[in-house]
Image (spheres, coloured by chain):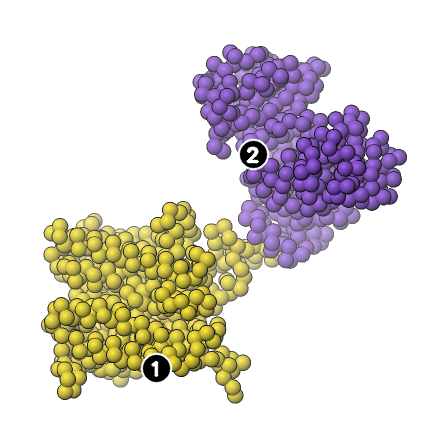
Chain colours: A yellow, B purple
Amino acid sequence: MTLRVTWRASASLVGTVLKWMTVPLLLPLGVALYYGDGGIAAFVTTIALSFTVGAALERLGDPADLGAREGFLMVAATWLAVSIVGAIPYLVAAHGLPGIAAATSPGSTLGSPVNALFETMSGFTTTGATVMGDISFDQHSHGILLWRQLTQWLGGMGIVVLAVAILPELSVGGAQLMDAEAPGPSLEKLTPRIAETARALWLAYAGITAVEIVLLYGLHHGGFAPNMGLYNAVAHGFTTMATGGFSPEARSIEAFAGVVQWVIVPFMLLAGTNFALIWQALTGDTDALFGDSEFRFYTGVLATVTALIAGLLFTGPTLDVVVGPIAGELESSLRHAAFQAVSIVTTTGYASMDFAEWGAAGQYVLFIAIFLGGSAGSTGGAVKMVRWLVILKSLKRELFTTVHPEAVRPVRLGGRALDETAIRGIYAFTAVYFVLFVAGTIFVAVDVTRIPETLSALEVMSAVAATLGNVGPGFGAVGPMGFYEFLPASTKLAMVGLMWIGRLEILPVLVLLTRAYWTS
Amino acid sequence: MRILVVGAGEVGSSIAGSLSDGHDVIVVDVDPERVDSLTYSEDVLAIAGDGTDTDVLRDAGVESVDVVIASTDDDETNLAVCGTVDTMSDAFTIARVKNTVYLDTWREYEGAFDVDFMVCTDLLAAEAIVRVIGLPTAQDVDPFADGLVEMAEFDVPANSPIAGETVAEADRFDELTFVAVIPDGADHAEIPRGDTVIHPDSRVVVVGRPPSVREFARSIDPESAAGKVEDVVIVGGSKTGELTAAALANRGIHPRIIEYDEQRARELAERLPGATVYSHDATDPEFLSREHVKDADAVVATLGSDERSLLAALLAKREGAERTIAVVEQMRYVDLFETVGVDVAVNPRQVTAEEITRFTRERRAENVAIIEPGGAEVLEVEVEEDSVLTGRTIKEVMADLPDGVVVGAITRNGDYVTPRGDTVVDVGDHVVAFVQASALDEVTSKL
């Protein structure tokens, strides 16, 4: 049996990415130096390790041998590698370096390697599920908590997209790599050169993030948000545009004023929009965005889910919650409905309140919304709007051809007829997605019988769906104010796998598990 | 005029034949046999040779001809002929093409390919079919301003509800102007006033937005136009069929297309969002009855082969379709088709030859339609800076123009504007006006 994959080429590129990972690590290191509350050793160690391992891997092979197959391996391995390296700061912070530095977060739940890997994978894949037991500056340093936010921002637009944007050696195979990583059925090139496209996407992404940070910090200066200081503004800017959902505040966005919540909603909406369309709109072609059928469907779904939940909250029973009265209050029911609907549909995972407090109807609507997802080419996860739209349209076609068997009826998206193979691909993806969801649910349901806590069906299903779809919080014990920490290690490792597979849209990872990929 | 025709196929010969009674016609064709037969059958000078060859063109006297008509069966050859001629002489070039892409380019960029006037065979055939389908009562329909405006001539039958009414009474449509009335037996068109009575058997000419023209057609003859045409079945997805479907869809009619070849059917379905495409054998009676072809208001057979088109049209007729229209490739079969039961036979080459002939006779750059008898014209002009119309109201302008002019419609930036006395005309507007033969020279110089 001979290997038909030049894995050395893939490994070499993964090495290059790890080497470059040292650059973003400088930011939390700087923060650690500024605040002086620990983390310097953690980041220095990680930078050294990342550079050494990266440089070693880089020597393994020649990146010029990178073909389509090696691309899949490179993308999948990159995400695993950065998640492993990214976990090191948490481990060092929890345990210290024997004889060199003391632990800065002694007793942190992230001291367990499985937990640290879970937290990092949840970060890079912009899931937002957390196993950090005590989110506070008493337990963790400013540097460590900012690194947690930064992993999401880096993962949001995509590590490989960023690599294509800055590494000249990826100019040829770059399109394939981006295709394997980018969310949605197909990649849109904005410019003749793929590196320029990647740069444009990152520029739009970074630009909107900057605008949000300025707005949030502006609210603080205006006196509307006393606790939204510069640190929090940057931290939330990072995780909104990434549809991440991590927050250095234990109570997520509930900790902030209503006006802050209103400001975050449109940015979550933008984050779930196709960045190619945003780029076109920014360069003057707003029709491309507002006329896009996926965008219209996406905003329509958001409006519908919001209206439904707002109605349920407005007419629902008086809730015993810390955020103040909701039932009968128009502004607060609308705000909490819009915030949660947009957060869950775009797979951000923020919460403006603990939705476990809602009535059953509202919770079920939100549970279904976990499967919707943002747009193709956005930073969102889950199945994605364009796939649902195509499925709905082709089902409608199916009904027509049942009556008229000879009719030839292409499925149209924005005036363009879709290729039948593309439609088949979308069905296949969605089917595999639900197979994984069911398989994951069964595994977790069985696995959690080993722990003292009893989980309800909704809790198990939502936890699996929220990790596979990179949403983050589920319901009940794993809800927005809860943690995944109490789950058995095997379940957490399975979820690490689900987040990884879910972020890369299943097929680039699953294909690695086939014999045909390696040998034929 | 001296006219050079390149390509002596059916279209070329037909054009040469009809133009030879008033002009000097020279024909160039690569096939010596055709050249021989043409020399004896028509009063033209026929030369054997390649029309893109400068020696042949010089032999044909290209430097002294006024018009060159490239009408071979090959698009690229025709364009090459026009390009070659344009570099050699100042002749006005006319090209016939099949591919609509060339036509679109030419329409978008004036003078593209060095062609001064371009006609597309399949498109002309499709337009002829749509006219027949769309306005069963109209005698002639001509589109203006990219189809935003239509001119139509109608005969008013004695039993028509508007027979005996005045123009003011009959004109119930906002976006429609009566530009001329031709009383039965008159030798020229008259400009109607509000109190002009529309007598039975007279002919009226209207200009307006296509939907209004259609509604007017219904008010003239509610019976024959009563069953509003909604359901059109196109049998055969040939290029003409495709263009017909596209033109019908533009008019809000969503045709059904039956095409045997699966790949072509898929292609049609992708290109024509407004149509429903079936991939099946159109001569299968069981299929025809299952898809209720008998309910169709019109069935168009465009199968590309005359035998099969005839068969399909007759089958549809027997199924119970109201009207059948067949595309006939061979000119000599036109009468035969109509004799055996096809309602209308359309021959693309004949339509093309007529269009080129008409255009060569009129030789005007603007879009124009001739109203017979009397030679009045409905013409379209784009308003320029120095036009008498610019920046003034229609009322003011009419005082400066001779009698015998009616402004029928205006389009501005692709929108229809109903002309009223106080409407101000801007530079860039397209004005569609009726002009009496006697006023033509003075009016065209002022507009």
Horizontal and vertical percent position of residue A70: 45, 75
Which label is found at residue A56?
1
Which residue is more in the foreground, B153 or A145? A145
Q: Chain of mark 2?
A: B
State the image quarter where residue B369 is shown: top right
Q: Amino acid at mark 2?
A: Asp
Residue A83 against residue B209 in the figure, above or below: below
Residue under label 2, please give it. Answer: B146
Q: Quadrant of the N terminus of chain B?
A: top right
Which label is found at residue A71?
none
Q: Of the residues tagged 1 and 2, which is closer to the observer?
A: 1
Horizontal and vertical percent position of residue A422: 50, 63
Residue A345 against residue B122 in the figure, above or below: below
Residue shown at 37% from the left, 70% from the top: A502
Horizontal and vertical percent position of residue A261: 21, 55
Which residue is more in the foreground, A446 or B263? B263
Which residue is more in the foreground, A37 or A333? A37
Q: Quadrant of the C terminus of chain B?
A: top right
Horizontal and vertical percent position of residue A367: 31, 64
Residue shown at 57% from the left, 26% from the top: B380
State the image quarter where residue B178 is shown: top right
Q: Chain of mark 1?
A: A
State the image quarter where residue B231 is shown: top right
Neighbor class of circle 2 (other Cα within 10 Å; few <14, some 14-19, many 20+) is: few
Give the alpha-carbon distance from disc 1 to disc 2, as whole Å: 68 Å
Residue shown at 63% from the left, 41% from the top: B113
- Left or right: B337, with A42 as reference point: right
Residue A341 against residue B415 in the figure, above or below: below
